[in-house]
Image (spheres, rainbow, N blue to C red):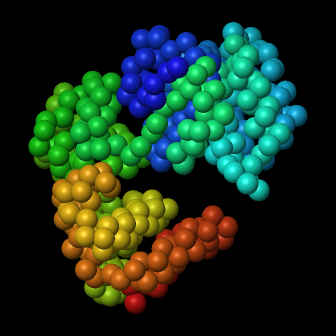
């Protein structure tokens, strides 16, 4: 029976060719690393030329037992293996009316004798019930990998490793500033690292000045300033800051995402502080950089819970409108900022 891995032990094992399992369960909220782990598995199992024929992504909420049986037992085309990724696999661990009985029973039977040519990956955000038969079988015949949000030490390791693969190093001062500005959202961190490498293509070591010169206003102090203005109900300043970010080339969708992320952070911090959780524990529980926690604690004083939840509702409405409306995205974002700051 295998132990539960984290991303780093999984990556080390697969790069060393030490993973022989054909069934995997990836769970946790860190979607960025889950995507990277799936890519590692696909690269390990498939050649680039055979990927189009042998890589399949399914949604557990929409699949029926017949289709699932066919896909799990299908043979690869021009390859030794095929990869089947099943998203939203939490339905296979559900109870009561939400249970998918036929599919759950089919998977349980499949796990008794898995197709060796099929690399099967279950993905779910929530923590699985370890008492479930499916979980026990996956843990027995396959590998379970947990993907929590990275703590600050793990984030620093990930940044150094990513830069190392690009032939760069980063000094401690620059690393500290970068992670303070971006937090532990790896999609944001990756974007900033790509910009850094493009900005300093010949530099072996990235310095604090380089980070300050290239880091996005949204990823850096810009989003803090905007949330400060919103919390102070300073509508004109909030709109000016937003327009400054848009003129600088930031995507409206990205700014919206960062705003919603900051609102959720403030809401989480307020909830923990209302339970008298010490700052150190809040920092650890939410995996926040000390500078980010300091800013969020300051901002939390300007918002009540109702404002935050209403603000998130307006931001969600803007997100839906951006995806389904012909209106200009910058205009929709500006209207949302007007609502949450007035």
107 lies above or below 48: below
Indicate the position of residue 18 as horizontal and vertical percent values.
Answer: 46, 11
83 lies above or below 117: below
- Residue 210 shows up from this direction: no
**Residue 93 is drawn in which quadrant?**
top right
Indicate the position of residue 143 as horizontal and vertical percent values.
Answer: 54, 24
In the displayed orientation, state which residue is furthest to the front: 131
| Foreground residue among 155 and 96 | 96
In the displayed orientation, state which residue is furthest to the bottom: 342
- Asked if residue 147 lies left or right of residue 214, the reply is right
| Foreground residue among 317 and 327 | 317
- Asked if residue 77 lies left or right of residue 45, the reply is right
Indicate the position of residue 312 as horizontal and vertical percent values.
Answer: 48, 74
- Residue 131 shows up from this direction: yes
Task: Name the residue: 57% across, 32% down.
Answer: 25
Task: Name the residue: 37% across, 28% down.
Answer: 8
In the displayed orientation, state which residue is furthest to the right: 66
| Foreground residue among 258 and 15 | 15
**Disc count in the image?**
0
Task: Name the residue: 79% across, 38% down.
Answer: 103
Q: Quadrant of the C terminus?
A: bottom left
- Asked if residue 293 lies left or right of residue 93, the reply is left
Task: Name the residue: 80% across, 31% down.
Answer: 106
- Asked if residue 1 lies left or right of residue 238, the reply is right
Indicate the position of residue 88 as horizontal and vertical percent values.
Answer: 65, 45
**Residue 270 is drawn in which quadrant?**
bottom left
143 lies above or below 308: above
């Amino acid at each position: 029976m295998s132990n539960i891995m984290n991303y780093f032990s999984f990556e080390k094992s697969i790069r060393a060719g030490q993973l022989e399992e054909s069934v995997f369960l990836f769970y946790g909220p860190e979607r960025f690393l889950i995507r990277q782990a799936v890519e590692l598995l696909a690269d390990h199992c498939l050649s680039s030329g055979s990927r189009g024929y042998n890589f399949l992504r399914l949604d557990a909420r929409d699949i029926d037992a017949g289709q699932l049986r066919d896909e799990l037992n299908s043979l690869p085309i021009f390859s030794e293996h095929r990869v089947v990724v099943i998203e939203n696999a939490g339905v296979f661990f559900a109870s009561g009316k939400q249970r998918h009985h036929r599919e759950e029973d089919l998977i349980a039977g499949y796990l008794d004798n898995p197709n060796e040519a099929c690399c099967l990956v279950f993905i779910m955000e929530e923590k699985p019930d370890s008492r479930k038969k499916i979980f026990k079988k996956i843990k027995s015949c396959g590998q379970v990998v947990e993907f929590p949000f990275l703590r600050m030490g793990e984030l620093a390791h990930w940044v150094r490793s990513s830069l190392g693969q690009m032939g760069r190093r980063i000094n401690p001062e620059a690393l500290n500033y970068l992670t303070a500005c971006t937090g532990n959202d790896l999609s944001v961190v990756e974007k900033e690292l790509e910009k850094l490498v493009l900005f300093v293509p010949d530099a072996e070591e990235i310095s604090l000045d380089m980070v300050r010169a290239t880091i996005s206003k949204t990823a850096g102090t810009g989003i803090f300033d905007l949330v400060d203005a919103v919390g102070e109900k300073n509508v004109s300043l909030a709109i000016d800051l937003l327009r400054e970010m848009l003129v600088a080339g930031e995507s409206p969708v990205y700014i919206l995402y960062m705003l919603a992320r900051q609102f959720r952070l403030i809401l989480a911090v307020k909830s923990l502080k209302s339970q008298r959780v010490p700052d150190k524990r809040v920092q650890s529980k939410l995996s926040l950089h000390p500078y980010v926690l300091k800013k969020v604690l300051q901002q939390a004083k300007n918002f009540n819970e109702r404002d935050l939840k209403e603000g998130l509702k307006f931001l969600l409405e803007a997100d839906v409108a951006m995806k389904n409306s012909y209106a200009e995205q910058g205009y929709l974002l500006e209207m949302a900022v007007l609502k949450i700051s007035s």
